[in-house]
Image: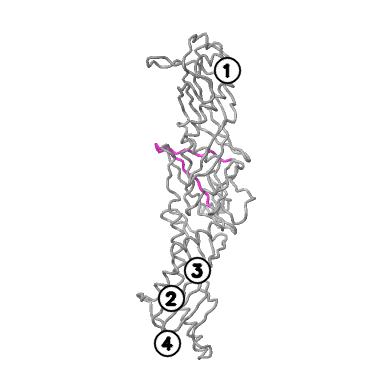
Amino acid sequence: MLWILCLGFCGLLPRTQADPGALLRLGMDVMNHEVQSAMDESHILEKMAAEAGKKRPGVKPIKGLTNLKVKDVKLPVIALSFIPGVGIFQCVSTGMTITGKSFMGGNMEIIVVLNITATNRLLQDEETGLPTFKSEGCEVILVSVKTNLPSNMLPKVVNKFLDSTLHKVLPDLMCPAIDAVLVYVNRKWANLNAAMPVGQMGTVKYVLTSIPTATANYIQVDFSPVVQQQEGNAIQLADAREVLEFPKDYATGSSQLLLSAAFLTAELALLQKSFDVTVRDRMIGELPPQTTKTLAGFIPEVAEAYPKPKPLVTQIRINKPPKVTMKMGKSLLLLHGTLEMLAARRRGRAPVSIFLLEAHFNLKVQYSVREDRLQMATSLDRLLSLSRVSSSIGTFNEKELTGFITDYLREAYIPVINDALQVGLPLPDILDMNYNLAELDIVENALVLDLKLD
């Protein structure tokens, strides 16, 4: 008894999101587009019309009307509205001409304008865990009916016949169209929880936190993404200090995708090894020659240790997971690692370490979208700190290297980071979403993609 009471009480508690991740808000703009596309792709009304005249097992012929055929199906006009907590109410307005041999002899034409209405309930498939729409309560409402029969010819008999005939024909003919269209819509959720690669380093999977929720203005889909290394180890998302919420200044009916800074941080952890680099080039961009002679201009002790210039070898290792931060309009990538300068030696001998520094620096991040991937491009924001870990040339003031290291990071290291980031971070594969037109906004602790239609 106690556990039943506990379950009942816990059900009253407000729902919290276990992991910060991603939120998707599907407005009426997207849903209208998807349902209309499904209707166009399926050609379902035309198919239903073609099937109308065929004999079907278990379906009795209509008394008084033979050789039934349907033609001249009008292009449907679709109107949708959200039903909070349920899904979508759908109304399809269309028209057609029904022909056949009437009980009075001769050919009969019935020109019908009608509305098909149904509730598309949003559920979660028990086998796949994916969202799915299921129609219920389908009704066919006659807007107008015209025939080629004279209006004064037994009007009561004719009207009764028409009413009886249409109410028998239309629901069986039209309501399956709603179900068939939803099959096309539901297929577009099929790849939502598939694992998507991030280069060769791992995968990202968008896992639903719960059944999507319908409100008066949109459907919200909450994700707890799974970020997994190639070896199979999952990268945990950092705890969120604040509940993720969409900004309130987007147009009613529009659609957005929100990606938390914690989620992007977990994804970049997959690329951490790609941020390690060893540079042996003597000439790099606008930098002076990378030799001990150039380095001695900042640290005189280098000239004493290496009176004859030696080429430099530089190793940068990122020893802490990269971290993404976001404030209104600005995003930074925080990197913490070591920078070691070594003097090269001839005849294949290993280079000799001159010094090892611990370095902490920030990169500015610019976001864009290419196809179904989020792209990031970085530039150096600033070098935050340098501290000496070891040195083979004795003590020196590492602060004297600030300008030299800053220029080095900008010219030699940032291109490596940007090259590694070209793999892109996968966006959720949902409803054939075209992300290319999205407008991107950096808000507090999140990136928002304001989704646009073609």
Q: Does the magenta stretch include residue 225?
A: yes
Amino acid at pointer 4:
Gly
What residue occupies the far right of the structure in this picture? 249
Q: How far apart are marks 1 and 3 (CA)?
A: 74 Å
Disc sitting over residue 398 in the figure: 1
Residue 245 image offset from top left, x and y in percent: 60, 47
Callout 3 environment at 10 Å: few (<14), some (14 to 19), or many (20+)?
A: some
Disc sitting over residue 106 in the figure: 4
Instruction: State the residue position of label 3.
Output: 75
- The one nearer the camera, 220 or 19, is 220
Amino acid at pointer 1:
Glu
Mark 1 or mark 2, whichever is nearer to me: 2
Q: Distance between the residues labelled 1 and 4?
A: 102 Å
Q: Give the range drawn in magenta.
A: 221-240
Q: In this view, does 393 lie above or below 236?
A: above
Q: Does the magenta stretch include residue 248?
A: no
